[in-house]
Image (cartoon, helix red, strand yellow):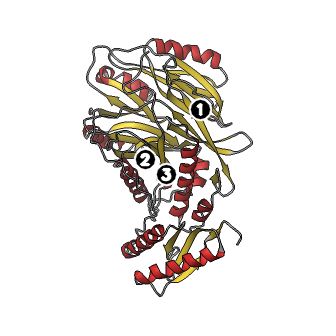
Amino acid sequence: MLVAAGVGLAQGKYEHRVVVATTSWDRYNEIHESLERNVNALAAQGFQVGAVVGGNAGVLDRLLERQAVEAGTTGHGAHVFVVMHRPETGDLVKREYRLLQTSVWVGVEKQVKQWGEEGFRLKTASWVGPYFHGVFERVEGQEKVEYRLYRTARRKGWDQQIMADPEARKRLRRVVAMFLDTALAELGPEQESEAEFVWEIDGLNERSRHEPKLQARGAAGFRVQMVRVRRSELDVALLKPAGKAEPVKVELEDGPWGAPCGRGRIAGVDMALDGEAYCVAEDVRGPVVNVGVDLELREGATFGRQFCETRARMMSPRAAGRRLARARQMEEELNRDVKPGYRVQYALAGVQEGRSERLVFFATNEREALGGGEKVRRREAVRLRVELDELGDQLRDRREKAINEGLVEAGVTAWVELNPSGGRREALLLGCAETRLEQQEVESLLWRLLVGEGLADYRVRNELLREGFR
């Protein structure tokens, strides 16, 4: 069996976290920086990025409450869900991430070249409408690589541009298409044998004809770089890397939502307009097994079980608060439904033909190499919270955090938002209570905490939901 370094059956259960930007600003830079900051806060505690949710832009627009881009002010394409994981037992390694989120190629080559020199390597990528989302990962002691951008020019596609570069042919290890006219190439040390790149394209309903061609390429040492549904066709990009090429067994599968990709390392997956998922897996003779987890969207852009806490968090007037509520709900579903030993590797939003909108997560029991990085002590992972980063918000943010810590210490399922929509001095109390008496007791506790923070003049708006009827 031919497998990559670190591949094998994972042991134990994984803890999953879903990360979103939590800033109160709405400009691209602030959104991007908030998301990257939140990802790295968890990475410092041993979490790895598993997937960035891609696929149907309309579905994600509603879930993330993304707005249209306004020139010079906003660019909400940086709003995206990032799924991270760490094993509940065993060693943990510190990681660091850089996120590339762009709809244009300008300036990208300089940035990715710098990241390669600093030891970052492309971990995973997804596509949402015109946006490319790439996640670059650095682990201490990781090999450095070089990244180059190739673009369609002079009537030659980016693939032809790569193959026309003699140096690239001897160093090429990976190719990732960013846009239709742009691709990112990963280069390593020079090898004796040159790389080869091909597309295998066929109709979505021509699996019996398409799969044998992919299998022949795998037997010749080609590795899948990308699986893309384009209208009624399935495009598969394959690369025989520079150097010695080992054969792999390849399978093409299709089916509703998370059903495909039953065995083997998932090399690429995409979703058609009717909700069918198309997947190509490699090394399917090995022990790697994959499962799918589907979440159907419901009214109000939520999904899964409607816990009281979820309903309460959705009552926040802060846009970041609602995004965070959906992320936490997604976490709850994944941590409940993903089987022990499995971690989320791909995630797509889609629309089932004539029916529901869904998110589908592809989880695998393939083990990732721990790496030789800095070990970190296991502790309770940080919880994301809405950032109050408007001018003059530092004191309000500190006071709100202190009050909420007091509510947590008291063991109640409640939290406060100070001046949630600006204007008058108001404390919005959200959360859950079993009885009317408990509602009153939590409000009294909040009053004491407000006085302790010098906020006795604040008006309390009690919006606690009652789970009971007493």
Residue 349 place in picture, x, y as percent: 59, 43
Q: Is residue 118 above or below residue 156?
A: below
Location of the C terminus (image quadrant): bottom right
Marks 2/3: CA distance? Answer: 8 Å
In the rendered image, which residue does mark 3 sit on?
A: 77
Q: Nearer the viewer, residue 281 or 105?
A: 281
In the rendered image, which residue does mark 1 sit on?
A: 230
Image marks 2 and 3: residues in contact by CB distance under 8 Å: yes
Task: Say which label, 3 or 1, has the lower sequence index.
Answer: 3
| Crowding at mark 2 (Cα within 10 Å: few <14, some 14-19, many 20+) | many
Can you tell which quarter of the image residue 143 is in? top left
Marks 3/1: CA distance? Answer: 22 Å
Which residue type does callout 3 highlight? Gly
Q: Is residue 40 above or below residue 187?
A: below
Q: Is residue 429 above or below residue 237?
A: below
Task: Say which label, 2 or 3, has the lower sequence index.
Answer: 3
Q: Nearer the viewer, residue 312 or 359?
A: 312
Q: Secondary structure at mark 2?
A: strand
Question: Does residue 152 appear anywhere in the picture?
Answer: no
Which residue type does callout 2 highlight? Gln
Task: Say which label, 1 or 2, has the lower sequence index.
Answer: 2
Q: Which residue is located at x 46 percent, y 16 percent?
A: 248
Which residue type does callout 1 highlight? Arg
Question: Does residue 105 appear anywhere in the picture?
Answer: yes
